[in-house]
Amino acid sequence: MKHFIFLLLLIFSIAPGTNVFASVCGSEFHIELINHSKGNSLILSMIASPEDTFELKYIHSVEKTPVFEIYNFDSKGQIYLTETTVESSGYGLPLAEDGDKVVYGEKTMTITGMHKRIDCLLMRVSYLNDMFLSFSLCSINLRDVACSGDQIEIKISVAVKREILNEGSCQYRWR
């Protein structure tokens, strides 16, 4: 009976859109928010899978214009910027590269088809403007979970399950 209850808890803890088979039988991925200004403390951890995307919406600190970015990650936990929409170009904003598609709106430029590897996704929480991380059905204002000026990292953690033959149970080894 306790194994059945554990299985139900595991199934209900998986976020919508998550690859259930990968979460139960292979690697388990978490999108994590780490606060480097508070001793590398974990702010938030959400179960995800490599098919999932997450989005950042913020006001650029120099250009003072909205930025909308879409990211995904691979089976090794490497983050990639796949799309960005801006109203201006300036310091720190991506430029279109060969193979990218650029769509111009009335006041915006959207670059799609990107596959820009992001080695470290760091940002400083704004003193003035809201900054949103959106994933699945969840949207989090970073100003609600960290102090203005805090340095936040978004990273993917990968738990690899390995079978213990004599006990028949899975254990996690965090990367």
Image (cartoon, rainbow, N blue to C red):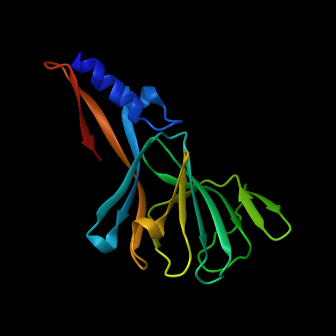
Which residue ends up furthest to the bottom in the rendered image? Answer: 62
Residue 126 appears left or right of 162:
right
Q: Is residue 56 above or below residue 15?
A: below
Residue at the location (40% across, 42% down)? 29
Residue at the location (46% across, 74% down)? 125
Q: Is residue 154 above or below residue 86?
A: above
Residue 122 seen in this snapshot: no
Quadrant of the image containing the N terminus? top left
Question: Where residue 152 sits: x, y (%)?
Answer: 41, 68
Question: Where residue 99 sits: x, y (%)?
Answer: 73, 54
Q: Is residue 92 above or below residue 25?
A: below
Residue at the location (41% across, 31% down)? 12
Which residue ends up furthest to the top in the rendered image? Answer: 1
Which residue ends up furthest to the left in the rendered image? Answer: 166
How many numbered callouts?
A: 0
Question: Where residue 162 sits: x, y (%)?
Answer: 26, 30
User: Front-most of 112 and 18?
Assistant: 18
Residue at the location (32% across, 41% down)? 159
Q: Quadrant of residue 171?
A: top left
Residue 136 appears left or right of 46:
right
Residue 147 seen in this snapshot: yes
User: Front-most of 139 and 164?
Assistant: 139
Q: Quadrant of residue 111?
A: bottom right
Question: Where residue 173 sits: x, y (%)?
Answer: 25, 40
Q: Quadrant of residue 98?
A: bottom right
Residue 81 appears left or right of 100:
left
